[in-house]
Image (tube, rainbow, N blue to C red):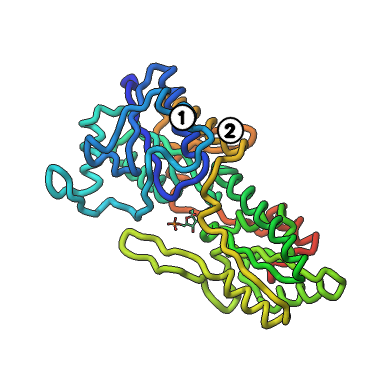
């Protein structure tokens, strides 16, 4: 095996709290093993031109552990493989340019930190000869093969805090408050924040809901004296006879933008219960701010493990959390799949046992 002297590191897809913690861990542990790091700007775009990257030494990552966002920048776009790109050397096929520049920059390996899209692209590059290790990131927690992605715990903590705040105003005004949370086509954030925040109804994409069942549950609360209710709705949730609500349809190189189900649910519940209802969309607030201590520790462990895998030559893999361990999984087993909430999830069943309705 050729000794690893210099590695590239990039962050892709939507940001998530903990990205900087991974970068810091990779740079510091690589440095301490005699490996240099090059930070690539804006995901794989950092491999298009020489001036889209910079050397990262420990002093460049000092103090970033607790910062949200990513010091490298990120982009959220579809698979670039077949697309053409304008470069300083003329029009090129994106993937060919990236591979060419990877070699010209004297990189020996790549750490790609990202969600399903970034990891799928990384897997393609690995198949085309780039020694690559992936690090799973997403607040949605929907990547298969890892119990947790960093960012998820922070998003849940934020959403829980928001639900706590909504509880007091809901109770004061005897209202129904509907909270729309992120998660794309997985209900993890809604389920965890809903249970942690004591929601009365949790609507997730895995369980198409009947709004009449939800309304009946809230009317029952009114009857026994709880004059307010909290409903948590995942952005990807949809009614039994309906479909996912979109803010924007998918376009070329762009995924669809989900949203709007919170407002719809709010309106329907107002009609069906006759109560005052209000809705709140937590949106990108869930992706901002400092990572929780859990996410900082997980991100740091992921970064350290990524460097270990590179030193061992275990490429085409993704670091993963299999409690209590951090392990390696083949990217081939992970990409193109979505980890959704299983119907026998302990948390789901516990919530049901407590009387939380999922609208089914
Ligand atoms: O995947 C993370 C996520 O925050 C989803 O929960 C959400 O649907 C999406 O990204 C929003 O993407 P954008 O930042 O492009 O609006």
Q: Name the residue under label 1.
A: 24
Q: Visible in this render: residue 121?
A: yes
Q: Is mark 1 on a helix, strand or loop?
A: helix
Instruction: Give the quadrant of residue 104.
Output: top left
Quadrant location, the N terminus: top left
The residue sitting at 36% across, 60% down in the picture is 254
Q: Mark 2 points at which residue?
A: 297
- First in sequence: mark 1 vs mark 2: 1
Quadrant location, the C terminus: bottom right
The residue sitting at 73% across, 71% down in the picture is 175
- Distance between the alpha carbons at the discs numbered 1 and 2: 12 Å
Between 210 and 288, the residue placed more toward the observer is: 288
Q: What element carries label 2?
A: helix
Residue 278: give x, y in percent of width and height: 64, 71
178 vs 101: above or below: below
Left or right relative to 85: residue 123: right
Residue 154: give x, y in percent of width and height: 59, 45
The residue sitting at 60% across, 58% down in the picture is 187
Q: Residue furthest right?
A: 224
């Amino acid at each position: 095996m050729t000794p690893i002297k210099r590695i590239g590191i990039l962050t892709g897809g939507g940001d998530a709290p903990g990205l900087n913690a991974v970068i810091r861990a990779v740079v510091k542990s690589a440095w301490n093993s005699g490996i240099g790091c090059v930070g690539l700007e804006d995901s794989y775009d950092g491999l298009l031109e020489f001036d889209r990257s910079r050397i990262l030494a420990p002093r460049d990552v000092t103090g970033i552990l607790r910062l949200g966002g990513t010091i490298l920048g990120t982009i959220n776009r579809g698979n670039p493989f077949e697309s053409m790109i304008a470069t300083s050397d003329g029009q090129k096929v994106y993937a060919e340019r990236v591979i060419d520049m990877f070699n010209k920059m004297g990189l020996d390996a790549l750490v790609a930190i990202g969600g399903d899209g970034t990891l799928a692209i990384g897997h393609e590059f690995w198949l085309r000869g780039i020694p690559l290790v992936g690090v799973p990131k997403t607040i949605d927690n929907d990547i298969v093969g890892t119990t947790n992605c960093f960012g998820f715990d922070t998003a849940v903590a934020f959403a829980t805090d928001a639900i706590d705040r909504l509880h007091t105003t809901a109770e004061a005004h005897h209202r129904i408050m509907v909270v729309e949370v992120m998660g794309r086509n997985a209900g993890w954030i809604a389920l965890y924040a809903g249970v942690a925040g004591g929601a009365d109804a949790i609507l997730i994409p895995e369980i198409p809901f009947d709004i009449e069942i939800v309304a009946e549950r809230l009317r029952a609360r009114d009857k026994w004296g709880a004059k307010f209710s909290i409903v948590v709705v995942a952005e990807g949730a949809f009614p039994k006879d309906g479909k996912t609500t979109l803010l924007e349809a998918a376009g070329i190189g762009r995924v669809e933008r989900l949203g709007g189900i919170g407002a719809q649910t709010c309106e329907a519940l107002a009609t069906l219960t006759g109560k005052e209802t209000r809705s709140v969309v937590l949106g990108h607030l869930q992706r901002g701010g400092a990572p929780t201590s859990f996410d900082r520790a997980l991100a740091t462990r992921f970064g350290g493990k990524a460097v270990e895998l590179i030193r061992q030559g275990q490429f085409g893999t993704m670091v993963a959390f299999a409690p209590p361990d951090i392990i390696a999984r083949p990217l081939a087993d992970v990409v193109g799949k979505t980890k959704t909430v299983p119907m026998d999830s302990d948390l789901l069943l516990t919530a049901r046992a407590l009387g939380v309705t999922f609208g089914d």
